[in-house]
Image (spheres, grey):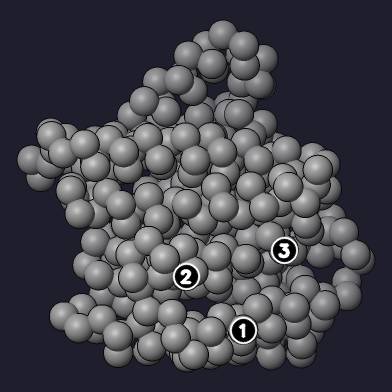
């Protein structure tokens, strides 16, 4: 059962990048994101007003405002850059790999920012992870004619936005229920994306059926499927298990993109993905402190699903 849940989680979470690619051909990034989050925000607000009212008790306005800022960074800023990069022609696999570097960067910055010990193996893992990204990115750039070089920098902006959200959340002293944080994040993202769509004249959804197929794909698979399975596996198997699975998103997305969209998946791409996975192993095994903030254990746990899946504050990791 755990194996099947893990497989379903990896497929659902990585489907967020594929869904972004599906919608890119029929609408702009802000249009897709507005209609992805608008119905979700309505549902979550209804849940918050009924069955989840107790989760909001004791929260100050400052706590909610902090979650709103985290939501802007971890969802709005991150997803907008991911969707925009894919719209510009960056492959879904490359975008997913750059997203996968976030826990490595967070792990490296945990030393100077959170005074957490960072071993030599972890630094080596970070360097390997960067090398893996460079290898895959150059392979993608060489195979995709007409994509501007600066388009490959956009996913990095989103990744760093996610890192900032991670550390902002880790420094919070107030524990917030996942239902509350998800609601605040999604409502904030809805406001941001709706404002952007209306101000740019992109709020009107296109008539193409492919657009609604992409929206249904993103809401059903990426949001509810990915987010729901994230918390189920987290409860059954722990944080380390979930974050190990997160690093499978890049290779799965790369294969998926090659099959569905004909994206390049040659020897160089395979090499880069292998280097990235080796980096993950080094970072995971190189952390020997008994109470540590794992890479990716705070803040948003990757947003392929775009549902703001996260843990509240520093977590003692499994060894």
Label 1 crowd bin: few (<14), some (14–19), many (20+), radius 10 Å = some
Label 3 crowd bin: few (<14), some (14–19), many (20+), radius 10 Å = some
- Hey, which residue is sitting farthest left in the picture? 201
Which residue is denoted by mark 1 in the rendering? 274
Label 2 crowd bin: few (<14), some (14–19), many (20+), radius 10 Å = many
Which residue is denoted by mark 2 in the rendering? 254
In depth, the one of 119 and 25 nearer the eye is: 25
Tell me which numbered mark, 2 or 3, is placed earlier along the sequence: 3
SS state under label 2? helix
Query: Given this view, does label 3 or label 1 mark the residue nearer the observer?
Result: 1
Tell me which numbered mark, 2 or 1, is placed earlier along the sequence: 2
Identify the residue at horizontal 42%, vertical 28% (top origin): 40
Residue 211: % across, % down: 24, 41
Q: CA distance from mark 2 to mark 1?
A: 12 Å
Residue 251: % across, % down: 55, 71
Identify the residue at horizontal 65%, vertical 78% (top origin): 277
Identify the residue at horizontal 24%, vertical 54% (top origin): 24
Q: Quick check: 15 left or right of 166? A: left
Would you identify the image quadrant in which residue 140 lies? Answer: bottom left
Residue 137: % across, % down: 40, 83
Residue 167: % across, % down: 59, 59
Tell me which numbered mark, 3 or 1, is placed earlier along the sequence: 3
Which residue is denoted by mark 3 in the rendering? 244
In the rendered image of this protein, does residue 52 appear above or below residue 90? Answer: above
Q: Quick check: 294 left or right of 267? A: right
In depth, the one of 14 and 54 nearer the eye is: 14
SS state under label 1? helix
Which quadrant is home to the C terminus? bottom right
Q: CA distance from mark 3 to mark 1?
A: 15 Å
């Amino acid at each position: 059962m755990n194996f099947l849940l893990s497989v379903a989680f990896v497929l659902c979470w990585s489907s967020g990048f594929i869904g972004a690619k599906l919608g890119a051909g029929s609408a702009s990034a802000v249009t897709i994101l507005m209609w992805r989050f608008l119905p979700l925000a309505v549902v979550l607000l209804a849940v918050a007003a009924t069955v989840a009212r107790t989760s909001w008790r004791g929260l100050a306005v400052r706590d909610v405002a902090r979650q709103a800022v985290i939501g802007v960074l971890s969802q709005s800023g991150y997803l907008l850059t991911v969707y925009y990069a894919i719209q510009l022609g960056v492959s879904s696999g490359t975008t997913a790999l750059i997203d996968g570097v976030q826990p490595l960067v967070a792990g490296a910055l945990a030393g100077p920012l959170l005074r957490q010990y960072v071993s030599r193996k972890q630094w080596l893992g970070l360097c390997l992870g960067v090398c893996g990204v460079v290898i895959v990115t150059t392979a993608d750039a060489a195979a995709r004619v007409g994509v501007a070089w600066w388009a490959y920098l956009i996913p990095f902006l989103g990744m760093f936005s996610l890192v900032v959200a991670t550390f902002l959340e880790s420094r919070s002293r107030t524990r917030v229920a996942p239902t509350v944080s998800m609601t605040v994040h999604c409502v904030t993202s809805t406001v941001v994306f709706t404002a952007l769509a209306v101000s740019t004249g992109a709020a009107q959804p296109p008539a193409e059926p492919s657009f609604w197929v992409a929206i249904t794909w993103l809401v059903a698979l990426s949001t509810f499927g990915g987010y729901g399975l994230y918390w189920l596996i987290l409860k059954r198997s722990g944080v380390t298990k979930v974050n190990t699975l997160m690093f499978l998103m890049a290779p799965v997305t790369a294969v998926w993109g090659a099959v569905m969209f004909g994206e390049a998946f040659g020897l160089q791409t395979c090499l880069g993905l292998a280097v990235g996975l080796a980096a993950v192993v080094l970072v995971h095994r190189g952390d020997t402190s008994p109470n540590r903030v794992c890479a990716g254990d705070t803040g948003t746990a990757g947003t392929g699903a775009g549902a703001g899946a996260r843990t509240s504050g520093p977590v003692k990791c499994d060894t």
